């Protein structure tokens, strides 16, 4: 049975929830009515999710009943972006001696924890993804969750069999989970970096690459070097952290990552948000000024930007002109076809128009190609080519 | 005395206006309350303007009492844009044998007509611009308005002393008015092109360049040639018209014009609409596909696009980094300093933050440089360079 939005909620349950959240009952009722607070589907319907940030509760926070009260798996804190490394790092981390620098990987954000006696992979929005959950169960040392039921892994699912953000750049055959934070349930309090590293190592988890700690004074120039190296291998960028995890992190990305975002955005130019496109472009402007590039470097950057925009645009228009449909291709790899069927139902539920092709056996698993249809860009391009005006 | 929005309007006046428009009185009252229908300022307050398109009445339409009824100067009809020349022209003008092609100039749209015994220059939004009005009175053969009080000139104010869209590309010393349409008051009905040309010639008006009439079948390829030539001299593009002006026109622009728009947009990246930026970029994609460009041409287009975006972005960031403020420079040329003072008051009224510099004598006139401050991009850039996150 599915229940979602505008639903009747048991008044007694609302009352207990209100008391846990410190809200009044009318407010909780209102959150349900607006679907700002909603249930997951099917067998996960006892897991509530915050669909919006509400009074400092992160969007995507998951909430469920436990031992007569509630327990929360706190959403991903939004990481602010430095547009220039200097003076942003000094300003943001003022008071610290050193900052830690880790790689920001390009994958799919996922929280993994035990909730209601089951290990679950929770998306940024607070959904329980059946595919990611199954992969987490297969890939991770589950002993961790027995030993630390109060902790949550915050990580990135990366690799070519990631159906959301498929990337070949990490030399991963299928998918792996790279953990970047461990946080406590309810409070969301993160472990200091050293402590996190010790625990992750002990249980044999992959963790995001740790570059080093740098003095606040020289961090910007050290990070510039790292960003240039990461860019050359098409990696995304870095997250800059307080080693004690008291202050919130900052992120900064390579030009190659900005251009890669733009390539994807302009392939589906009628789907992607205008703000998304603009922000990537503006980052390029600040980077060329901060790095004080000469005319040769600047021209190269202009060329890369121009090609990242026009290349995919041209390809999409040509595709439609040739009578083909525009889609995004991704793939998954499963041991049991039931996982694929569950995932297909889940995407449908999310309103994503995806075609699952025939499963191809690969070892003792199946690989399934998924085509996500980009109807809006497809239709717009088709109409223009048929003589419609803009 | 100024009156604008949420005003008390004489019920008897509302009643007459409702009867003229064919609306009920409550609707007219509502239009005034919402300022969808508003008065001009000062001595023009008896001229009403439509601030929005209402039931097929074009936005910018100006309305005033005349001989016991009302008279309307109809707003600029929105001209649709062809994203590809073929098949759009054939589809849009189907049934015609030939289409006429005229130059689309890059200036400021203005309607000039006699209303309440005064010659007025009316902006796209229906404001009476005191500077443009004065220039029209100086530049145009006013006998036309005596002979044809029922006609309205639809034209473009172009040249370097145009304070809205200053352009040096037309070899005009100060400003001139180029007329592209003559329409009747009230109905907005346009004169056929030949008839318009005869009248404009007779009174010695400048009119936009007329290229030729082309058969529908070959128009797209002929226009492609024209667009390439116009692009080389940085001119904007063409308007394609039904010679009888029964069907609405279509417009199409050069790549150079798209890039010029982008240069302006990215100079003030935090002010310009995201849709404005995207549409210019997407036009480049369709043009390269329609013109079937080879890789050399494509790379050149990418480079031009990249530079049109990053060049002004870099310049703006550098300007702010050097402690200077971002502004748009324009200038006007007046015989009487009162015109400049009136124009300054008018811009203030419109909420535009502009600094008028000291008048410089030039012949028997004065040139005045105007700096329009772009506060939003200035402040955003400054904050980022001080270490604020995005």
Image (cartoon, coloured by chain):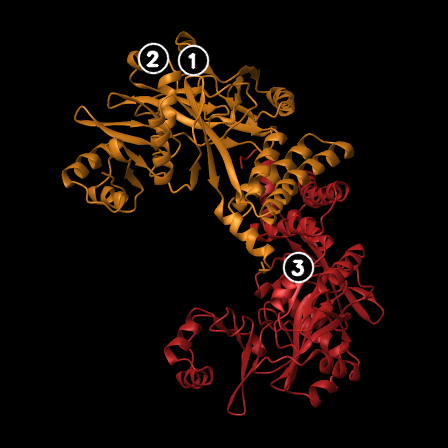
Chain colours: A orange, B red
Q: Are marks 2 and 3 on the same chain?
A: no
Q: Are marks 1 and 3 on the same chain?
A: no
* Image location of residue B31, percent across then percent down: 43, 73
Q: Nearer the viewer, residue A326 or A237?
A: A326
Residue B369 visible to the viewer: no
Label 1: few (<14), some or many (≥20) within 10 Å? some
Q: Quadrant of the C terminus of chain B?
A: top right
Which residue shows up at 66% across the image and 64% down it?
A: B251
The subunit letter for the residue under badge 3 reads B
Q: Give the quadrant of residue B75.
A: bottom right
Which label number is shown at residue B86?
3
Q: Nearer the viewer, mark 1 or mark 3?
A: 3
Q: Give the quadrant of residue B382.
A: top right
Residue beneath label 1, please?
A205
Q: CA distance from mark 1 to mark 3?
A: 58 Å
| Dots 1, 3 in contact, CB < 8 A | no
Which residue shows up at 14% across the image and 38% down it?
A: A12
Q: Nearer the viewer, mark 2 or mark 3?
A: 3
> Vertically, is A277 above or below B38?
above
Q: Give the quadrant of residue A121.
A: top left
> Vertically, is B120 above or below A93?
below
The subunit letter for the residue under badge 1 reads A
The subunit letter for the residue under badge 2 reads A
Label 2: few (<14), some or many (≥20) within 10 Å? many
At mark 1, the secondary structure is: loop
Which label number is shown at residue A144?
2
Which comes before the other along the chain, label 2 or label 1?
2
């Amino acid at each position: 049975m599915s229940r979602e939005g505008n639903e009747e909620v048991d008044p007694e349950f609302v009352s207990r929830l209100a008391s846990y959240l410190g809200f009044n009952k009318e407010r909780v009722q209102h959150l349900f009515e607006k679907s700002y607070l909603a249930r997951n589907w099917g067998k996960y319907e006892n897991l509530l999710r915050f669909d919006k940030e509400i009074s400092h509760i992160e969007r995507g926070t998951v909430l469920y009943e436990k031992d007569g009260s509630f327990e929360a798996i706190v959403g991903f804190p939004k990481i602010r972006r430095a547009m220039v490394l200097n003076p942003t790092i000094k300003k943001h981390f003022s008071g610290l001696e050193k900052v830690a620098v880790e790689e920001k990987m390009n994958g799919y954000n996922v929280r993994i924890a035990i909730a209601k006696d089951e290990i679950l992979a929770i998306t940024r929005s607070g959904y329980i993804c059946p595919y990611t959950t199954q992969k987490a169960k297969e890939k991770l040392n589950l002993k961790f969750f027995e030993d630390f039921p109060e902790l949550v892994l915050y990580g990135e699912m990366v690799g070519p069999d990631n159906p959301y953000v498929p990337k070949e750049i990490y030399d991963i055959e299928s998918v792996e989970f790279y953990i970047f934070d461990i946080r406590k349930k309810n409070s969301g309090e993160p472990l200091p970096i050293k402590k996190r590293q010790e625990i992750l190592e002990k249980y044999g988890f992959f963790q995001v690459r740790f570059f080093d700690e740098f003095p606040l004074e020289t961090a910007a120039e050290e990070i510039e070097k790292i960003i240039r190296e990461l860019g050359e291998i098409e990696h995304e960028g870095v997250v800059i952290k307080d080693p004690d995890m008291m202050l919130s992190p900052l992120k900064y990305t390579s030009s190659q990552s900005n251009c890669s975002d733009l390539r994807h955005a302009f392939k589906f130019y009628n789907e992607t948000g205008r703000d998304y496109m603009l922000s990537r472009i503006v980052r390029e402007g600040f980077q060329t000024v901060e790095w004080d590039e000469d005319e040769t470097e600047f021209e190269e950057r202009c060329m890369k930007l121009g090609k990242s925009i026009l290349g995919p645009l041209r390809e999409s228009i040509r595709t439609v002109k040739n009578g083909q449909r525009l889609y995004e291709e991704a793939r998954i790899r499963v041991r049991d076809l039931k996982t694929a069927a569950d995932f297909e139902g889940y995407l449908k539920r999310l309103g994503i128009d995806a075609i699952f092709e025939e499963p191809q056996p690969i070892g003792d698993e199946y690989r399934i190609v998924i085509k996500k249809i980009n109807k809006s860009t497809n239709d717009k391009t088709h109409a223009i080519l048929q003589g419609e005006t803009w």
